Amino acid sequence: MEVKLENLSKHFGKVKAVNNFSFHINDGEFVALLGPSGCGKTTTLLMIAGIYKPTTGNIYFGNNVVNEVPPKDRNIGMVFQSYALYPHMTVLDNNGRCWSSGKRKRYLASTYPGY
């Protein structure tokens, strides 16, 4: 899916967390946002995910503006920079914590024989 950010800004009062940011990601590209703490990486990702609404600008998925599309309907995901919610658990176990115990066990057994 092509993603385009056009003159995107997010302000919290007088603080400009993201200011007039434009960016284009072609379909199939793998992209990482890098920068120092406080430069707006997470805020930008939260706007793409639909958690934050932009103060100004537009977010496009393909040719569609998705600024008003709820997060649950965007069909995307995001992973925070902290690799695990619980450091003593595997990534799989961390991601499976939201499932009921029975559903999780069935999934793990069918996907990872011998788990």
Image: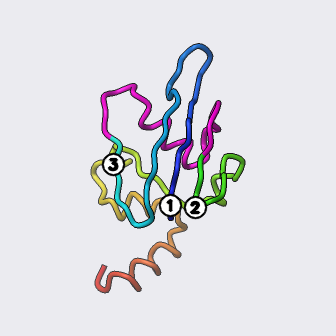
**Secondary structure category for the residue under label 3:** loop
**Do the CB atoms of the residues marked 1 and 2 lie less than 8 Å apart?**
yes
In the image, 29 versus 82, the foreground residue is: 29
Bounds of the magenta segment: 34-58
Residue drawn at (46%, 60%) of the image: 97
The residue identified by callout 3 is 32
Looking at the image, is mark 3 or mark 2 earlier in the sequence?
A: 3
Rendered location of residue 114, percent (x, y): 28, 84
Residue named by callout 1 = 2
Q: Is residue 113 left or right of residue 97?
A: left
Specify the color scheme: rainbow
Q: Which mark is residue 62?
A: 2
Percent of width and height locating residue 18: 50, 29
State yes or no: residue 86 in magenta.
no
Dot 2 falls on a residue whose secondary structure is: loop
Quarter of the image where the C terminus is located: bottom left
